[in-house]
Image: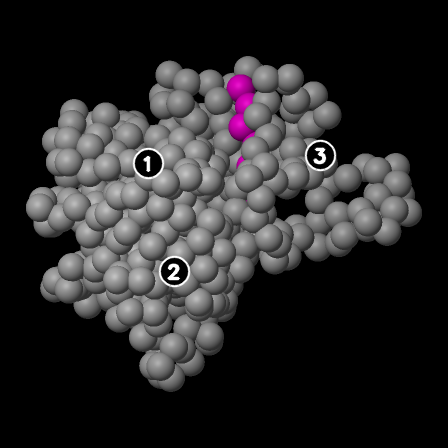
Amino acid sequence: MNDQSCDVLVIGAGIVGISTAHYLKKMSPGLDVTLVDSGPPMGLTSAQSGENYRNWWPHPIMTAFTNRSIELMEEIANETGNVINLTRRGYSLVTRSDNTDDLMEELARGYADAVEGSIRFHDRTSKELYFLSESADWRLAPSGVDVITDVDLIRNKFPSYDHTVCTLVHIRRAGSLSGQQLGQYMLERFRESGGKRIIGEVSEITASNGFRVRVGPHSELGAERVVNAAGPFVNEIAQMLGTQLPIKNTLQQKLAFEDKWGVIPRNMPFSIDLDSQLIDWSDEELELLGSAPELKWLTEKMPGAIHCRPDGGDQGRWIKMGWAFNDTPTDAIREPMLTPTFPEIVLRGASRLNPGLKKYQGRLFRSARHYGGYYTLTKENWPLVGEMEIENTFVVGALSGFGTMSACAAGELCASWVLGGEKPHYASALSFDRYNNQELMAEMNALSSKGIL
């Protein structure tokens, strides 16, 4: 039996595990770090990323956490000539309601730690102060948030939107990136600094002079410390260590296809329809769906937060869309079963905000890509990064739909826990410590939104 040893074993080579391994070596170059996974790097959940980022959250802790990750991504973009294809057209949140008190309270709470004037309001008297950048360059975009209540301004700047939209919130520090390029960059830095990577499935972990970890049928690794970065399989690794995590998986799906008819402007931000809706089925379709018990739910009111964005840059032709309406817990498998009806569901839903998409209903091209992955999340939809209850074991997980955008900050934070170094102010709140903070938990449970997209 092959027998190796290391100081720290990181289990899981998704983008978060890669980031953790990278920052461990960056913060402690002499540390012996091994990264293990049963498949190729970023070959499972990370491969299904929507490749978006945002600092918009309903709580300042999550805003600070993702702001830090964006800072780190911007550093990488600067160092590499933007090999990660970082853009910053923002997130556009739209509603047809003029009663936006709850949304404004959420904005104020989420950006409570931002500088004064970060949230700017634009009505008929101030609309000239707002601009929609023609450039996707992240260095040229403003920070903060623009709230637009002038209907004419919305129609002028966002011509593809349905004309019933009357309030638009433009989150400026948000956009897209190449998750694969980001992961590859960190993996290369990890290798260059002496980090090791092995391929094999972890099947058993025992505590013995540290930890003995069985990898594949013939190998065993010794490790002083173990980091559980196994994505949707974090609880399987936790159980091997003799513990359990308060985490579930839900399967979320996405659709991407070539916009051959050019109905989505290439400079359109990542656009989110906040309003719930009844999907626009024909009378005949409604009758058919209503007669099938397993499909009847499609005739009922659907939640908001369906989203759509251009993909492939200003000269590209593809678009992506998603709708995280599934909240049914499920066990993770390597090749999840996708719902055949999802492409038409999400296309119908997205057509409400961008009516031009109706051209594609029932006419999607064969090249369209229907894909999906797991959102691994806690009840409050905050990540778990820090020490597990077993000594010298750590977790970095529950990053649901924000794994790519938060990978840098999550990896850096987990490395700080492993190394016992100085941690940011949000470290305790993103660890198991939060469950002992009754005031914080009450505050989180009272939030009307969990930031799930």
Judged from the image, the secondary structure of the residue bearing numbered disc 1 is strand
The segment highlighted magenta reads 252-258
Identified by mark 3, the residue type is: Pro
Query: Does 249 appear above or below 172?
Result: below
Residue at (34, 81) in percent of width and height: 437
User: Real-space Cα distance between discs 1 and 3?
Assistant: 36 Å
Q: Earlier in the sequence, mark 2 or mark 3?
A: 2
Q: Which residue is mark 3?
A: 340
Query: Does 228 appear above or below 48?
Result: below
Q: Residues within 10 Å of mark 1 (few under 14, many from 20)?
A: some
Q: Can residue 410 be spotted in the picture? A: no
Judged from the image, the secondary structure of the residue bearing numbered disc 2 is strand
Hey, which residue is sitting farthest bottom in the picture? 438
Nearer to the camera, 200 or 361: 200
Q: Is residue 133 left or right of residue 341?
A: left
Query: Does 230 appear above or below 48?
Result: below
